[in-house]
Amino acid sequence: MKRLARFAVGVVALAGAAGCLTARASEESSAKATPIFGVELPDGYRDWPLITVAREEWLKDIRAVLGNERALDAYRRGRLPFPDGTIIARLAWEYRASEENEAAFARVLKGPPGERFGSFVAGHPVNGVQFMVKDSKRYAATGGWGFAQFDDGKPADVKVHQGCFPCHEAARERDFVFSRHAR
Amino acid sequence: MKRLARFAVGVVALAGAAGCLTARASEESSAKATPIFGVELPDGYRDWPLITVAREEWLKDIRAVLGNERALDAYRRGRLPFPDGTIIARLAWEYRASEENEAAFARVLKGPPGERFGSFVAGHPVNGVQFMVKDSKRYAATGGWGFAQFDDGKPADVKVHQGCFPCHEAARERDFVFSRHAR
């Protein structure tokens, strides 16, 4: 399972956001940009509005999907396909049991401390940060989406990016995006 | 456990954000405002930046904590106490197993379908939406925080709001806020 998970981190981003493939050569790739798609880390993405949250047990994470204004606008209107300029980000953190929360719940609810509540919070970042960038011309071969994964701020390798689109094809009817907007 | 959970939904919001109490009478309460604290549903909170995510097994939810610009600014600077005007929001959704994600993972990873991945997404909203509003004078009796819970957009009752502050007292050293900013 461990090997499987490691493979899959780069390959899928289902409840998350980005995947990546195609044998298309990337002329614009650089040390800062991802292979294949040439995507650079978007500015300010950490403060974008929340699309939804998710949990992947097999990847040991809890995650959030954020979107830029164009992404949120499309979600609010319920309009597909997403317009060019849309960017969707998937962040993930270690799924960490919170002793602090357990203790506080137990204190207020007059019960014994322990792990009876099952309170989990976001620990350190894991599984990279992934993006889907809409540009219907530039990324015509992959449904109009460029895919990107950054590990500690650095673009992941080609192999990682080859797995994104094949997985996201399963969401073709929703413009290749799995995440729904959580009301 | 069921009764305990029902009690606690209104009483605690640990990995979330808001709690509420005190016998202070609220003169400004209205049909729109919460009892005790007189907080109205903040405009536009759904699109505020993400502070962190969490999961409460005992409340059967997966949740997100969002903050207005003042909240995020304080988190970024690592400065306590939070300034007046800070608002922190806790949203929660049903913790729903995703058959769609399981199927897509299984397809790409060439395994049998089933529940081997443990992929969970946000379902319908549950457990109300809670807020902590900083006003060090107005809410001096409760650490400078007003607490609020809305269920389907309507203020929860007095009993619900009486439980917030006693629980948040456990986080006194972090200005009564449990949530940490997830990088």
Image (tube, coloured by chain):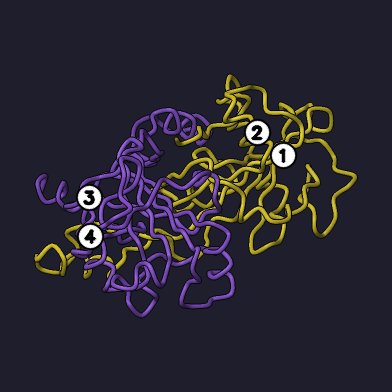
Chain colours: A purple, B yellow
- Quadrant of the rendered structure where residue B118 is? bottom left
Decide which of tag 3 and tag 4 comes sooner along the chain: 3
Q: Residues within 10 Å of mark 4 (few under 14, many from 20)?
A: few
Q: In the image, which disc is placed on residue B66? A: none
Circle 3/circle 1 CB separation < 8 Å: no
Residue holding disc 2: B165
The answer for how far apart the CA atoms under marks 1 and 4 are is: 51 Å
Looking at the picture, tell me which residue is in the foreground, A141 or A94. Answer: A141
**Front position among marks 3 and 2:** 3
Q: Position of residue A70 (x, y in %)?
A: 56, 64
Residue holding disc 4: A25
The type of residue carrying mark 4 is Ala
Q: Position of residue A6 (x, y in %)?
A: 16, 46
Q: Position of residue A16 (x, y in %)?
A: 35, 57
Give SS at disc 2.
Answer: helix
The answer for how far apart the CA atoms under marks 3 and 2 are is: 40 Å
The type of residue carrying mark 1 is Val
Residue drawn at the location 21% of the way across and 46% of the way down: A157
Q: In the image, which disc is placed on residue B133? A: 1
The answer for how far apart the CA atoms under marks 3 and 4 are is: 23 Å
The type of residue carrying mark 2 is Phe
Q: In the image, which disc is placed on residue A9? A: 3
The type of residue carrying mark 3 is Val
